[in-house]
Amino acid sequence: MVFLIWIVLFVVVVSFLLFLPAMWRRAILERYSGGRPVVCPENHQPAVVNIDARDAATTVMDGRSDLRLCDCTRWPERANCNEACLAQAIKAEPYKEVAVKAGKKQIYHLPVLLAAFVAWYVGAIWHSHYLFRAQWMQAVGLTQAQVKQMVWSVSPQLLTAAICLLFAYGVAWLLAVSHKKGVLQGVLMSVLLCGAVMAMSWFGIARLPHELFLIEAGYAVLATLTVGAIVGGLFDKLVMRPQ
């Protein structure tokens, strides 16, 4: 139970710390996305250009200001121009329909719910008498009666389910922010989030008994891989679509 409380607290803290730069990046992407009308300095004719929004997000967050174009209606014939219209493009208002399309992100809830349920179910089996309940009881120092009461109590089950759900949404959110999908990308994001949580909560985790640490670490690895594979692999496949 102490381990679960540590995980909840640090998942919340890490999510908050990741939320701030992600929102900053999102604001930059929305600021520089979309086609923009300009007057070409070479022929003084109207043109439409696109600022490289992803490069702009990286550039601005690094403290630099060297923006660049990624497309123009005069390209590829004039793709080697000096981009003298960039100042106009920065000041111009983007076409709304293009800006909305460029900044769209989506989190699909069914894969998240499925991943959270599977992670919770794996945890129930992992801590059952079929696998590691006896070792877990000995490491925690609980009796059979106390464990039986915990198993049939609602609060621990809800807490575990909430952790799994929060972690699954964290993985889905990282995939949406980075515009990634697929099993490999889901596993990578899941490992990244789990590693961040573990790193920030290492002081509390390191104080756990060695045997308890091995049991919980094994479950954490299995749950991390499971959540990442399901959320990433089914990212836009298992979707509730309007009729």
Image: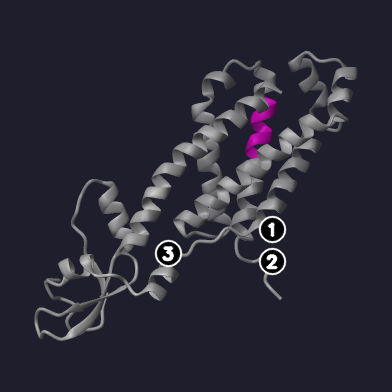
Q: Quadrant of the C terminus?
A: bottom right
Question: What is the C-alpha distance between the residues marked 2 and 1?
Answer: 7 Å
Q: Quadrant of the N terminus?
A: top right
Tell me which residue sits at (66%, 37%) in the image: 163
Residue 127, numbered circle = none
- Where residue 120 appears, x then y in whole percent? 74, 41
Q: Nearer the viewer, residue 232 or 51?
A: 51
Tell me the amino acid under the disc marked 1.
Answer: Leu
- Contact (Cβ within 8 Å) of mark 2 with mark 3: no
**Helix, strand, or loop for circle 3?**
loop
Asked if residue 127 can be seen in this view, the reply is no
44, above or below 69, in the image: below
Residue 240, numbered circle = 2
Residue 204 on the magenta span: no
Q: Residue furthest left?
A: 42
Tell me the amino acid under the disc marked 2.
Answer: Met
Tell me the amino acid under the disc marked 3.
Answer: Gly
Question: What is the C-alpha distance between the residues marked 3 and 1?
Answer: 22 Å
107, above or below 129, in the image: below
**Dot 3 or dot 1, earlier in sequence:** 3
Q: Is residue 190 left or right of residue 212?
A: left
Mark 3 or mark 1: which is in front? Answer: 3
Region rendered in magenta: 214-222
Asked if residue 62 can be seen in this view, the reply is yes
Q: Is residue 240 left or right of residue 195?
A: right
Residue 215 on the magenta span: yes
Q: Residue furthest top?
A: 141
Q: Which residue is mark 3?
A: 103
**Dot 2 or dot 1, earlier in sequence:** 1
Q: Which residue is mark 1?
A: 110
